């Protein structure tokens, strides 16, 4: 994509932060910006603490960004192009990145590394983040709670990014969460179409073993079947499981089209990731650099969302080419699924969530 400088406010941020207004060609140096004399901002001591709170942004900044996903994953490659390369080129390498993709561990490990200051920034899901630090906010990652990206933006603004919401809990743990980006809608794979709760009664569906996920689908009528992810293909091939769920990217990357004939776009779960920063590192940035980073994150969240959506459509086309029958969202009675799972969701919200289920649905 082309990176336009946008409105006057955006240009002023670039000027204040010492950023060239003419964006150069994206280099091939990968995730290290090549500034040569970075000040070690990933040491867990607030990075550029010496210049925090002032308007002088001339010092180099190196940001260690962690992801539990590997470097070849779609999401990491998209973050590289839409976020990392953008910042490194707009700042002529003054702000550079060290990308730790799939090298630290899973969600818990990358989050803990960012709390400790081993890394400065992480991209992670709201459910994994809430599970680690604020379990009463895991609702953002439960099935049939979030309708679409527009609904998520309302939930995000009302309950997640506020200091009296999830972000407040994270700040108490030394983290600051910023706007999230969509990286996929999850659907159902099977050897038949799935458009209503009647289609999944007694269906042996493989699910990740999150209690809330299992509870919702069992309430709807699924026979939840625990299968390790690395055994999913063989389980579907041999009939140990009849069905699975996940994004279309997973369906294609694991070649499930060879053992499942249908992919139904149930959109039961909107997969999101958020930019999350070590609070001490954030406070150590100059005022101008903080403003600049927040501005880029705000734009990148929307750009990544759009890019992933386009890539999903390519994956649907590829699945059709492999002979898969695709059931699109407008053919699925999602409201019937929500109604079928609602008794469990309401019980969950009354006992465990910080927010009432109906309050979320009313947004």
Image (cartoon, helix red, strand yellow):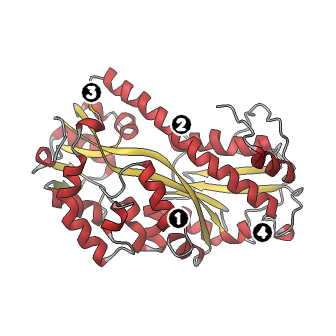
Q: Choose between 22 and 91: the one closer to the eye.
A: 22
State which mark lies toward you, 4 or 1: 4
Disc 4 secondary structure class: helix
Q: Which residue is mark 4?
A: 284
Mark positioned earlier in the residue sequence (4 or 2): 4
Q: Which residue is mark 2?
A: 307
Mark positioned earlier in the residue sequence (4 or 1): 1
Mark positioned earlier in the residue sequence (1 or 3): 1
Q: Choose between 118 and 4: the one closer to the eye.
A: 4
Query: Taking 117 as reference, is 51 left or right?
Result: right
Q: Which residue is mark 3?
A: 324
Mark positioned earlier in the residue sequence (2 or 3): 2
Disc 1 secondary structure class: helix
Q: Which residue is mark 1?
A: 109
State which mark lies toward you, 4 or 2: 2
Disc 2 secondary structure class: helix
x 47%, y 33%: residue: 311
Label 2 CA crowd tier, 10 Å (few <14, some 14–19, many 20+): some
Between the residue at mark 2 and the residue at mark 3, the CA separation in whole angstroms equals: 23 Å
Residue 246 in the image: x percent, y percent?
Answer: 33, 45
Disc 3 secondary structure class: loop
Residue 24 in the image: x percent, y percent?
Answer: 80, 33
State which mark lies toward you, 2 or 3: 2
Between the residue at mark 2 and the residue at mark 1, the CA separation in whole angstroms equals: 27 Å
């Amino acid at each position: 994509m082309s990176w336009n400088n946008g409105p006057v406010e955006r240009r002023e941020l670039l000027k204040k932060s010492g950023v060239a207004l003419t964006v150069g060609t994206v280099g091939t140096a990968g995730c290290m910006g090549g500034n040569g004399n970075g000040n070690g901002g990933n040491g867990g001591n607030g990075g550029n603490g010496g210049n925090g709170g002032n308007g002088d942004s001339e010092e180099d900044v190196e940001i260690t960004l962690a992801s539990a996903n590997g470097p070849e994953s779609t999401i990491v490659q998209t973050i590289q192009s839409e976020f990392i390369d953008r910042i490194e080129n707009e700042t002529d390498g003054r702000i550079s990145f060290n990308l730790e993709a799939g090298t630290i561990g899973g969600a818990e490990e990358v989050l803990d590394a960012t709390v400790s200051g081993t890394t400065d920034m992480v991209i992670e899901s709201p459910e994994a983040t809430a599970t680690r630090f604020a379990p009463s906010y895991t609702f953002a990652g439960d099935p049939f709670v979030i309708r679409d990206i527009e609904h998520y933006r309302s939930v995000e603004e009302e309950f997640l990014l506020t200091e009296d919401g999830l972000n407040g809990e994270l700040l108490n743990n030394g983290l600051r969460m910023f706007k999230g980006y969509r990286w996929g809608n999850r659907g159902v794979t099977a050897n038949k179409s799935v458009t209503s709760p009647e289609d999944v009664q007694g269906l042996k569906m493989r699910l990740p073993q999150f209690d809330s996920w299992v509870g919702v689908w069992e309430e709807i009528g699924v026979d939840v079947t625990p299968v390790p992810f690395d055994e999913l293909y063989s389980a579907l091939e041999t009939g140990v499981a009849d069905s699975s769920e996940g994004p279309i990217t997973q369906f294609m990357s694991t070649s499930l089209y060879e053992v499942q004939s249908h992919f139904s776009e149930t959109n039961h779960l909107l997969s999101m990731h958020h930019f999350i920063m070590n609070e001490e590192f954030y406070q150590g940035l100059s005022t101008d650099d903080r403003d600049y980073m927040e501005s880029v994150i705000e734009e990148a969240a929307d750009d990544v969302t759009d890019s992933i959506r386009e890539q999903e459509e390519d994956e649907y086309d590829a699945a059709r080419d492999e002979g898969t029958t695709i059931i699109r969202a407008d053919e699925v009675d999602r409201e019937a699924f929500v109604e079928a799972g609602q008794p469990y969701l309401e019980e969950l919200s009354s006992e465990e969530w910080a927010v009432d289920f109906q309050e979320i649905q009313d947004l």
